[in-house]
Amino acid sequence: MKKGKLWMGGKILFLILLVTCMTGIVEGRDNNKIVEKQQPKDVIHLKVAYQPHLVALGAILAAEKQGYFKQENLEVEMVKFLSGPPALAAMISGDIDIGYLGVGAHIFGPKGQCVMLTMDSTDLSSEIMVTKKSGIKSIKDLKGKTIGITKGTTSELFLSLALKRAKIDPSKVNIVNMDAAGKVAAFMSNKIDGISIESPYTDQIRKNDPDNTVTIQTSKDFLPKAVFPNSWIATPRFLESQKNQEATVRFLKCLLKGQQYRIKHMNETVSLVADYLQQPKDIIGSLVEKTNFMDNHTVEKIFSNGTALKWYGAQERMFIDAGLLDKFVPAKEFVKPQYLMEAFKELQLENKN
């Protein structure tokens, strides 16, 4: 009887030891995963194109200040561009890695020159402004007048849409291509009759010469049918290498955290951008009410359920309707959400740990 008890006791002890060892192995594996996750990553240097306003700059400045880039071992060099086309040209040449595009420059996605990584926000700030001296009262009065735009940007798209809706042949309008600073200066010195422009430039014009400025069209006039996304992009060539794909995911993780910080601390972010650009806070902050900023939950949702693809498709149809694009390309061919979804996945894992 005693031998039986001893045998049973030994068997139980053996099983306990076996389970303990097995548990240790499993825990060891899990711990290895955690250790691997916490291993310092190689430092990657990224050159990032931004534009000098709250939407394009706020989240990356917040990410830098909060140390998000440092956490991912990213060295981010920020390079200023006044519009999307020259930034994209620099990306195609390899001088810039990742960049911000406003609404109008999204035309280059269907053309195969860039891919959309994530949507930052949607824009509500476009206006067609005219001088009082021009005598222009509505879009129909633009015939024979000189209007400043910047080709390949939101200003070109917006003017084209306005003319299309008013059934005006663009050839009947003297449309002049100028950079943003040039057309603002020309407008304020009465060298052109009107301007297609976005905030914060619209607010600068109104502030400097309120008595000679009239707005005859805004982007809100096209809602709810129209949608005007702002996005972060890369070129197909940049995304060919595994290292650049990893860098893109790391950057998007930081950007997402920066965007979430921006939306929760908007006043602080406005001050951050104003200090960086050395511009008045009221001018920088004017974009707050003219932009639909999205939190991370919304961004993840619209890319998961197909809404983002629909919005990019609707935007593409605006380019076609405006006569700026010849044929429709399915949005899935130039919208690549896999890097964004991987960034969300890694952020969720980090939050659990």
Image (cartoon, rainbow, N blue to C red):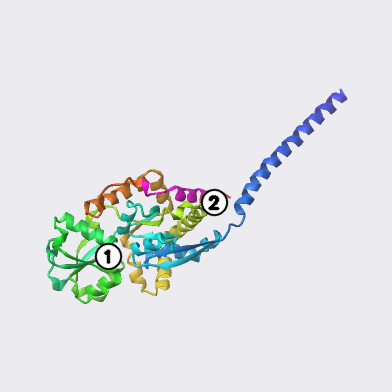
Q: Which residue is mark 1?
A: 150
Amino acid type, residue under disc 1 in the picture: Thr
Q: Residue furthest top?
A: 1
Asked where in the image residue 157 lies, by quadrant, the reply is bottom left
Residue at the spot 64% in from the left edge and 51% down from the top edge:
35
Q: Which residues are magenta?
A: 333-345
2 or 1: tag closer to the N-terminus:
1
Crowding at mark 2 (Cα within 10 Å: few <14, some 14-19, many 20+): few
Asked where in the image residue 100 lies, by quadrant, the reply is bottom left
- Does any portion of residue 265 appear in the rendered image? no
Q: Which residue is mark 2?
A: 351
Amino acid type, residue under disc 2 in the picture: Asn
Residue at the spot 38% in from the left edge and 43% down from the top edge:
305
- Does any portion of residue 221 appear in the rendered image? yes
Label 1, secondary structure: give it: loop
> Could you say which is closer to the camera, residue 311 or residue 234?
234
